[in-house]
Image: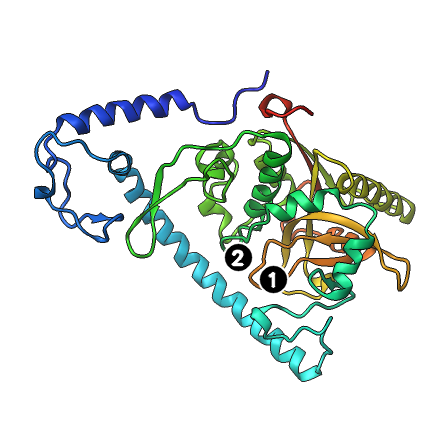
Amino acid sequence: MRALPFKPLSTTLALLTIVTLSACNKPANSGAVKGEVDPSAGVESKASAKSPGQKRTWEEIIMRADAADAAEYSAEVQKDLAVDEDTAKKYDQQDSELRESIKAKKVPLTQGRSYDDAALLRLQNGLIAFDSVKGMDLLTRASAKRDFFTLFRSIETQMNGQFCNAAAAVVVLNAMHHTSGLVAPVVAKPRAKDIKGQLKYVAGFGMWTQENLFEFTDASEVRAPQNIIGHGMDLDLYGEFLKKLPITVEVTHAGPAKGQTWTPMQNAQAFMDWQHKAINNVMTDGGYMIVNYHRTPLGQPRGAHYSPIAAYAKDPSNGKGMFLVLDVARFKLPAYWVPEQLLWEAMATEDSDEALPNRYRGYIEVKPDAQYVSLPQ
């Protein structure tokens, strides 16, 4: 039987009990730190605020118990933010150049969207915005859309430019939580300080988040959050990352391994295998599919990306199949329909790391691990 992927709750409760007893028996001013910020009040806490022996609230106990860890992690976060800021400036420059190029060429609007509408990028290369008239009509016509309802309920926006992998994982984990009763973290713990110096909680209220994903599992052993920023994860590494979660994982590349080649027939067969798996996946309960693709074939900037697919439909205007991608970069793109052949071409691109045994991107199928579900399957 596979080891439970969560950190033992008994250890957390034991530590909490010790801290609680200690806090109740100490004078209220013994744990006060000069200049410490009280997040609940937004002012400096004072030693005289509590009489000796007075019990602290649960929130105070939790915050003080992990204050040292939070301070240490906060320093790491500040370094990560500096790296992310530099990367963001580079990407912003690329986006600016793309905008000017689009304006200069006077590319026609897609489905009536203006380029500056909610800072969304313009959809190109046959992509159709889900929230357009045609996009919603495609969902109505879709023959395979079971996954749409649970995934759309759980959709996330990635926290930064490199967290598409974490956000995509959270989307499918919460979808499985709704449909299968997949276990999820319920313990709140202060982890880092926000930009105002306030301790922020890693709490999911029984749901997965892009923070507790790392806090309550061993996923960070594969790729810590600070290492994702600026580096991301290739497909195989992402597969190992997901295997640290309470789900089963199957990784498939959209191209041959290093030193091998595919004939046109093999490539066509690989496409048909993916098409069959993807359609079957979005039309049935239980499992979900995350696609790893490069944005360039879709007419989008910023390199490789991860997002889940949610439905499949035939475009009535040409009879071609299209998949609905729930893009987790929702701050700049809506969910959109992509021609299936174009999405495959975007997946059949190579990672820049030449040391990888298989540089091709592809897709990942995930299902809840039966050991960690509470609803009948």
Seen in the image, is 114 located left or right of residue 270? left
Q: Nearer the viewer, residue 228 or 202?
A: 202
Along the line of sight, which residue is nearer the eye, 327 or 48? Answer: 48
Residue 207 on image: x %, y %: 51, 38
Tag 1 secondary structure: loop
Which image quarter holds the N terminus? top right
Q: What residue is rendered at 14% in x and 25% in y?
A: 25
Look at 63% across and 68% down and name the residue there.
121
Mark 1 neighbour density, 10 Å: few (under 14) some (14–19) many (20 or more): some
Residue 99 lies, in percent from the top left, at 61, 76
Tags 1 and 2 in contact by the CB under 8 Å rule? yes
* Quadrant position of residue 238: top right
Q: Amino acid at mark 2?
A: Gly
Q: Residue furthest top?
A: 1
Q: Earlier in the sequence, mark 1 or mark 2?
A: 2
Q: CA distance from mark 1 to mark 2?
A: 9 Å
Can you say whether 61 is above or below 41 in the image? above
Query: Can residue 361 be spotted in the picture?
Result: no
Residue at 47 percent of width and 41 percent of height? 224
Image check: 116 left or right of 73?
A: right
Residue at the spot of label 2: 161
Q: Nearer the viewer, residue 295 or 38?
A: 38
What residue is pinned by disc 1? 302
Q: Is residue 108 left or right of residue 116?
A: right
Number of labelled discs? 2
Looking at the rendered structure, the kind of residue marked 1 is Arg
Residue 85: x and y in percent read 43, 62
Q: Is residue 118 visible?
A: yes
SS at circle 2: loop
The location of residue 3, given as percent across then percent down, is 54, 20
